[in-house]
Amino acid sequence: MYVCFDCGASTDSDMGFCPRCGSYNVQKVDDAGVREGTDTVAVAGGKVMIVDKRAIRKIFFALTLAFIPGLVNVFGIGHLILGRWVRALLYICSSATYFYLMYFSGYDLPGLYLAMATLAIFIVQMVDIYRICSKSIADAVR
């Protein structure tokens, strides 16, 4: 069975989109209503949590690709992984501006100003990606 995770409609055929609302968020579920690629985990108190393993891996990958390249002033890659295109473009443009000013502009800017600016951009990017990932983790674990 296939279920639309936007409107809740179910269908037996794999059309790739929801016949009710037109969304492409249609995924295959088993008889218990659990998506493929998820695990059910029993928690104390008799509760059951559903963990989407693919979403957790994507979040970890995005955090890693935001932090490590950010250390060398390459920003926005984690946002690309999470599908935040406008923010990713903003951070990639700030990286391009940094590299242009540092290596190609010919201006004699003090390195301390650029270092402070890139540190500020790195901190803002990491706070932003942490906020996005914390919401995504809440969605991945129900």
Image (spheres, rainbow, N blue to C red):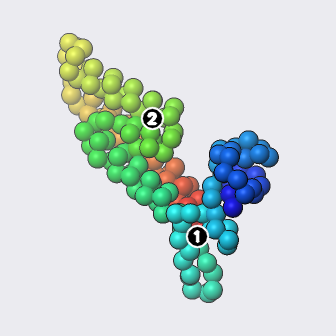
Occupied quadrant, residue 96: top left
The amino acid pointed to by label 2 is Ala
Q: Amino acid at mark 1?
A: Ile
Give the number of callouts: 2
User: In the drawing, what numbered circle is on residue 50?
Assistant: 1
Q: Is residue 92 left or right of residue 21?
A: left
* Image coordinates for residue 89, horizontal then vertical, percent: 45, 30
| Residue 115 position (above or below residue 81) | above
Are discs 2 and 1 less than 8 Å apart at CB? no
Of badges 2 and 1, nearer the viewer stands 1
Q: Nearer the viewer, residue 30 or 122?
A: 30
Give the numbered dot on residue 88. Answer: 2
Q: Residue at x 43, y 58 (%)?
A: 57
Which residue occupies 58% across, 70% down? 50
Residue pictured at 72% horizontal, 57% vertical: 12
- In the figure, 111 relative to 137: above or below? above
Q: Is residue 102 above or below residue 74?
A: above
Q: Secondary structure at mark 1?
A: strand
